[in-house]
Amino acid sequence: MRRGASFRSVALAVAWRVLHNVFTTPSLLLPSLIFPLFFFTAFAGGLSRVDNIPGFDFPPGYTTFQFVFVLLQSAAFGGVFTGFGVARDFESGFARRLLLAAPQRGGLIAGYALAAVSRWAVTATILTVVAVAAHMKVGGDGVDLFGLYGLALIVSLAGTLWATGVAMRLRTMQAGPIMQMPVFLTLFFAPVYVPLDLLSGWLHAVAKVNPVTRLLEAGRSLIAGNPSEVGLAYGVAFALVAGFALWALRGLGSAERAGG
Amino acid sequence: MTALAAQVGHIARRSLVRTLRQPASAIPPFIFPMALLAVTAAGLDSATRLPGFPSDSFLAFFLAFPFIQGALFATMNAGTDLARDIQTGFLNRLSLTPMRGAALVTGHLAGVVTMGAVQACFYLAVGLAAGVSIASGVLGALTILGLATLIALAFGALGTFFALRTGSGESVQGLFPLLFVGLFLSSMNLPRNLIEADWFRFTATINPISYLIEGVRSLIIEGWDAQALALGFGMAGMIAVLSLTASAWALRGRLTRT
């Protein structure tokens, strides 16, 4: 088999297996669907008065403001949930057999990543339907929305590569908090509840240099129909993917050296 | 009586030592609530500019949250540990000894409540170190610790009931998202009168967790508010009594089955 074809067949087989597992096991599927909806409900519903704070200027409203955060959060956490599956595969010994059987082991990472973005597409669809039903106002046109969802998809890819790298190094489910906490903190060290200008103190200083801030602000500008610094946000997202791809590949090398 | 006290003491010690020996159980109740307190207090600080907001410090307003989240961890730890005892057969072996059922539940909960009290002291110390002043003074701080301990007992008993009823650690863990949702659908982020969405305000009003949070919060930012305290202690007491009664009933069934 040619090199490209074997890479593709490994990736598709792994992706199919992960998706089959996830969509036939409610305990794996439901958390990734329910948690974004829950955060959206709690933030957009419970904090809607926040858009009355003097200086809060986001014309589409607070529901839309929070939707972008929850969309990006669901993308990143979709990747983390996939990382849990990678760790489970190593713990159960299945990954060891995968490493033995795969002619192109890079295809394993590609397969996990493909499964993660496919899985996130379902979550994003449900989240969008719920947000529209909750009267979310959208100012952007089709191109803007394409830009927003494209950005989120790249974030999902970055989240998957990060979590896969951790899972392949530690090869245990106990690595869950190590996959989860940095993503959680990086997301919340950004302007989650109010725009950057309304943050003060240490969080403002941290959020200013946090790359997630660029993603959030560009996403919010896209959905408002007033695109701003979108190129920079895509640059940040692609840089994260490149960095974490290297991280995941080196993790794969670590797993190979350890014999799975 | 002495024998019962000795039995309670042994089980309480075991419960406490077991939690402390498992970093995965002992550390999160200290770290996660503090991480959420830090990011939310900083992120929503500008909400204090909303007309009618009851405090000029969101950190002080939000400090009640860790006490309740810490109690949720008590639920999980209490339930998961007891479920493990059931799954590994430890409870079966205990039932062959003179150990009384009441001593088992009381001792188990004594360990949970001790952990809850230590957590509450930690949250209060962090709040004070971060510059929060307790409007109700030293006596109010002690009352906060008392209420937090009662809340830990209430949620710990709830976890105990689920463990005894299901005998499965996974089922107890499955309770966590439900309680977490209950926590977020409360008045934790804004006072109920400032919640704009009618359905959310209604949900927060019928949610008992709102009254637990408001009881602790009133002592921190308002001083002595008899109504908030009565509701806070009343709700916590009611959850504790119901959960303990249910636990006693479930224990009888569990010991009969074993």
Image (spheres, coloured by chain):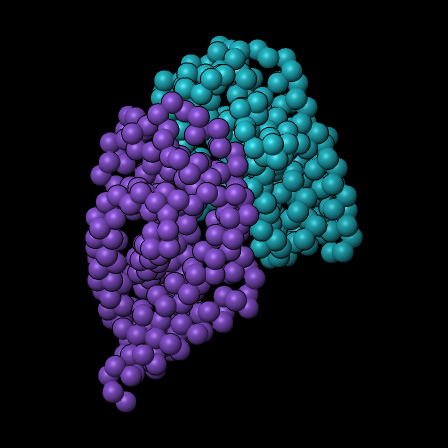
Chain colours: A purple, B cyan
Q: Residue at x 48, y 28 (%)?
A: A49
Q: Residue at x 50, y 47 (%)?
A: A131
Q: Position of residue A243 (x, y in %)?
A: 21, 57
Q: Position of residue B133 (x, y in %)?
A: 42, 14
Q: Nearer the viewer, residue B166 or B206?
A: B206
Q: Is residue A248 left or right of residue A67?
A: left
In the displayed structure, A96 sits above or below A40; it is below
Q: Position of residue A182 (x, y in %)?
A: 33, 46
Q: Residue at x 44, y 26 (%)?
A: A52
Q: Residue at x 52, y 67 (%)?
A: A23
Q: Is residue A9 left or right of residue A19?
A: left
Tell me how many marks there are: 0
Residue B187 seen in this snapshot: yes
Q: Position of residue A15 (x, y in %)?
A: 40, 72
As drawn, the residue found furthest toward the bottom would be: A1
Q: Is residue A66 left or right of residue B224?
A: left
Quadrant location, the N terminus of chain A: bottom left
Residue B76 seen in this snapshot: no
Q: Nearer the viewer, residue B145 or B229?
A: B229
Quadrant location, the C terminus of chain A: bottom left
In the displayed structure, B217 sits above or below B163; it is above
Q: Is residue A17 left or right of residue B103?
A: left
